[in-house]
Image (cartoon, helix red, strand yellow):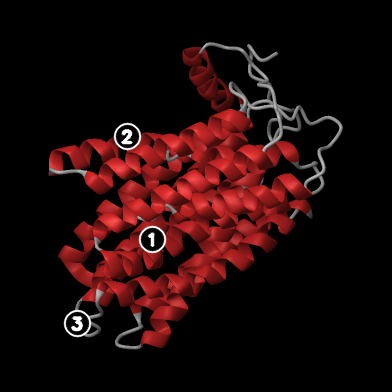
Amino acid sequence: MVRAVAWCSGNTAHRAVRDAEPSADSPLRGDGRGRRRLVPVLLLASAVALLSCAVAPTIGVLLLALVVLGVTTISGQLVTPLAGDLAGDDHRGRIVGLVGSGTLTGILASRTISGLVAGAGGWRSVFVVAAVVAVLLAVLLHRAIPQLPPRTRMPYPRLIASVGAVLLRERAARWTMALAAIGFATFSLFWTALTFLLSGPPFGYPVTVIGLFGVAGLAGVLFGLHGGRLHDRGWSLPATGVAWVVALCAFVVAAFAGRSVVLVVTAIVLVDVALQTQALLNRARLFALSDEARSRLNTALGVGNFLGGAIGSAAATALWSAGGRTAVTAAGAALCGFALTVWALGRRGPLVPTGRRVAPSGTG
C-alpha cells in the first residue's frame, strides 16, 4: 500500500513547523529523542523495507519485510505531537488538526493511489513508488524540523512505563482514549465492509473503481481542520457528541442505501466528517494535558487506535459473512450508541481535565 499517510503528514508538518509560533512556556522538546534526526532515520528505514517488499522473491521474505515495514512506518505518529509542541496554547487545536487531517487524508488517498499504481505497473511498483516518497520526505523533514533536544533522559523501559503512569493519574486521558479507540473501530468497520459492498452485487465494481470512493471521504478533512478550531474555542466536548450523532446518522443512511450510489457516497461523507472530527478533537484534548509527555500520550493513543482498528476490521469480515449489510450497519449503529453513552457519562466529570499539567516522574 502506498504510504500516502507519510506524504500528507510530512507535508502538513512542514506547514505547521513553518507557521506555528511557540508559546513562551512550551518546552519544544521530544520525550526521549530529538525528532529532527529520529523522523528522517525512520523514513529511510521504511524506504529500505519498502524496497525489500518490492524485490521479495518469496512470500516468506515478503512477510518478513512487511513486519519491518510496520515497525518503521511510524513517522506520522511522531510528527503530530511535534506539531503540538511547536504550537502555542491558543492555537494548538488548529495546528494539530492540520497535521492530523494530513494523516487521515493519507489513509484515504492511499486506497485510490495504490490501486491506480498497481493497475499501471503491478503490485511491486507500489512499494517502489512509496520508497521514493519516503526518501524525499526524509530530506524534507530533516530540513523542516528544528533542533529540539529531548526533555527526558530516562531509559527506554522506564520511558514506556511512564506512559501507564500518566494514564493512571489522569482520568481525562483514559476516557479520551476510550472514545478514540471506539472511533477507530467504527471507522475500520465501515471502510472494510464498504469494500465487500462495492465489490459484490448489485455494484460489482473493480478494485480501481472502489479505490475512487475514498475521494468522497476527503470531505472529512475540511471538517477536521475546523474541528481543531472548535477545540481552541473551548467547544471540544459538545462537538465530540455532535460528531457521534452524525456518525450514527451515517450508518442509518448506509442501512437504507439499497442500490443507490448517491446514498452510499452520502454515508461515506457523513462517517468521515464525523469520525475524523472526533478523532482530531480527542487528540487535541489529550495533548492539552501535558507539555512534557505528548509523544508518550500519543503512543498510548496510537496503540488504542490500532487495536480498535484491528478489531473493527475483523468484526466487519465476520459480520458481513453472517448478515451482510444489515449486520454491519447494525453493529456500526451500536458502536455509535455506545460511544455516545461513554461521552455522556464522561463529559461532566471524567472527560474534563483536572486543571493541572501532567508531568511524569523522571522528566527533567
Quadrant (top left/top right/bottom left/bottom right) for the N terminus: bottom left
Mark 2 or 3, closer to the camera: 2
- The amino acid at mark 3 is Pro
Is disc 1 surrounded by few (<14), some (14 to 19) or many (20+) residues within 10 Å?
A: some
Q: Earlier in the sequence, mark 2 or mark 3?
A: 2
Q: Spatial distance from mark 1 to mark 2, Cα to Cα? A: 36 Å
Is disc 3 surrounded by few (<14), some (14 to 19) or many (20+) residues within 10 Å?
A: few
At 36% from the left edge and 38% from the top edge, which residue is drawn? Answer: 48
| Image quadrant assignment for residue 61 | top left
Is disc 2 surrounded by few (<14), some (14 to 19) or many (20+) residues within 10 Å?
A: some
Is mark 2 in CB contact (under 8 Å) with mark 3? no
Q: Earlier in the sequence, mark 1 or mark 2?
A: 2
| Residue wearing tag 2 | 68
| Residue wearing tag 3 | 201
Q: Residue furthest right?
A: 24
Instruction: Inspect this view and state whether residue 341 appears.
Output: no
* Label 1 secondary element: helix
| Residue wearing tag 1 | 334
At 47% from the left edge and 51% from the top edge, which residue is drawn? Answer: 133
Residue 321 is situated, as x and y percent measured from the top left of the image, at: 16, 64
**278 is higher (above) or lower (below) than 63:** below
Residue 22 is situated, as x and y percent measured from the top left of the image, at: 81, 38
- The amino acid at mark 2 is Val
* Label 2 secondary element: helix
Q: Spatial distance from mark 2 to mark 3, Cα to Cα? A: 37 Å
Instruction: Inspect this view and state whether residue 214 appears.
Output: yes
| Image quadrant assignment for residue 174 | top right
**147 is higher (above) or lower (below) than 76:** above
Residue 46 is situated, as x and y percent measured from the top left of the image, at: 40, 39
* Label 3 secondary element: loop
Taking depth in this image into account, of 74 and 254 the one nearest to the observer is: 74
Quadrant (top left/top right/bottom left/bottom right) for the C terminus: top right
